[in-house]
Image: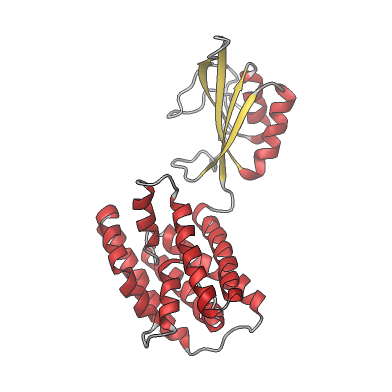
């Protein structure tokens, strides 16, 4: 199944490039973008250039991520290269540049997102960025963005500033779509609530949202008073609802809400079950939540 998804993703990415972006010299980022620039000046196919330039990055990825990563990435690149040749002589879908940027960026994001979600890659610059980020006070995303700004700057010099701006806009669209494909439409949020009314808040969250909370006992550093910390995971569409619950129950509660990139377990999409309202007052994040009752849903 992963290799089917890799092939599908590579085919969609190749279609996006050849039918939308390449005819208008709108560049992707990273290795593919560099390959697109070079292909304008040397008699090499885009797919072949992508594989050749990616070789050292693939080796780094193999050293860090193992043989399966290498196998999946090589497979995705071979399919990508082949499909670029298939789509190369087809007529462009549209000649409207705003449509090219929008639909090219979305399709490219879907294709690359499927490849990343399946454990492969088309672009080795992220491997380099990962290594560099350990030695620099920059995130992987910031380093990749830096690479791409340089690439788009070169494109602006060679092909005109409008090509660079279109390429940058396409990159942002593609990046957002990749995030959606990798993490899903219902991106999870973690909520941490420090409150003196833990039982009431936990009951309200459970009753109105069907989410359970894990309770952790804490102590104020200045006041030395005991506090209960509630931890739960919700979807982003439930953020406003949980804020209202907290404000209605304890307006002085301290709350943090953070993005969750990955969940191992079934806390978000779990079948409903019932529980006892007995408040335990303590919890272990590795176990079932401690607010339980025989008639309410589980997180």
Q: Residue at x 60, y 66 (%)?
A: 169
Q: Residue at x 66, y 81 (%)?
A: 96
Q: Which corner quadrant holds the N terminus?
A: bottom left
In the image, is residue 117 above or below residue 291? Answer: below
The answer to whether residue 4 is visible is yes
Q: Position of residue 284 (x, y in %)?
A: 45, 24
Q: Which corner quadrant holds the C terminus?
A: top right
Q: Residue at x 72, y 27 (%)?
A: 247
Q: Position of residue 28 (x, y in %)?
A: 49, 70
Q: Position of residue 217 (x, y in %)?
A: 51, 17
Q: Residue furthest front?
A: 157
Q: How is the image coloured?
A: secondary structure
Question: What is the quadrant of residue 274 in the picture?
Answer: top right
In the image, is residue 87 above or below residue 267? Answer: below
Comparing 205 with 258, the one in front is 258
Comparing 221 with 142, the one in front is 142
Comparing 2 with 78, the one in front is 78
In the image, is residue 196 above or below residue 284? Answer: above
């Amino acid at each position: 199944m992963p290799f089917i998804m890799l092939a599908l993703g590579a085919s969609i990415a190749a279609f996006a490039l050849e039918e939308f972006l390449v005819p208008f010299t709108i560049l992707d980022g990273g290795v593919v973008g560099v390959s697109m620039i070079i292909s304008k000046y040397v008699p090499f196919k885009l797919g072949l250039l992508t594989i050749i330039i990616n070789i050292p990055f693939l080796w780094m990825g193999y050293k860090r991520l193992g043989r399966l990563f290498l196998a999946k990435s090589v497979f995705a690149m071979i399919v990508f290269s082949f499909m670029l040749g298939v789509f190369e002589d087809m007529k462009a879908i549209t000649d409207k540049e705003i449509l090219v940027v929008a639909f090219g960026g979305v399709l490219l994001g879907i294709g690359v997102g499927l490849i990343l979600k399946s454990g492969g890659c088309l672009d080795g610059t992220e491997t380099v960025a990962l290594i560099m980020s350990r030695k620099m006070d920059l995130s992987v995303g910031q380093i990749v963005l830096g690479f791409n700004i340089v690439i788009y700057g070169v494109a602006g010099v060679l092909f005109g500033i409008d090509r660079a701006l279109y390429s940058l806009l396409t990159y942002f669209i593609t990046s957002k779509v990749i995030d959606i494909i990798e993490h899903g439409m219902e991106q999870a949020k973690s909520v941490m609530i420090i409150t003196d009314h833990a039982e009431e808040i936990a009951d309200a969250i459970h009753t109105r949202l069907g989410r359970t909370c894990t309770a952790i006992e804490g102590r104020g550093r200045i006041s030395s008073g005991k506090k209960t910390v509630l931890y739960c995971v919700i979807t982003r569409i439930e953020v406003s609802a949980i804020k209202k619950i907290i404000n209605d129950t304890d307006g002085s509660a301290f709350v943090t809400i953070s993005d969750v990139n990955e969940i191992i377990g079934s806390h978000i999409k779990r079948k409903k079950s019932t529980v006892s309202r007995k408040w335990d007052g303590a919890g272990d994040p590795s176990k079932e939540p401690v607010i339980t009752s025989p008639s309410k849903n589980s997180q």
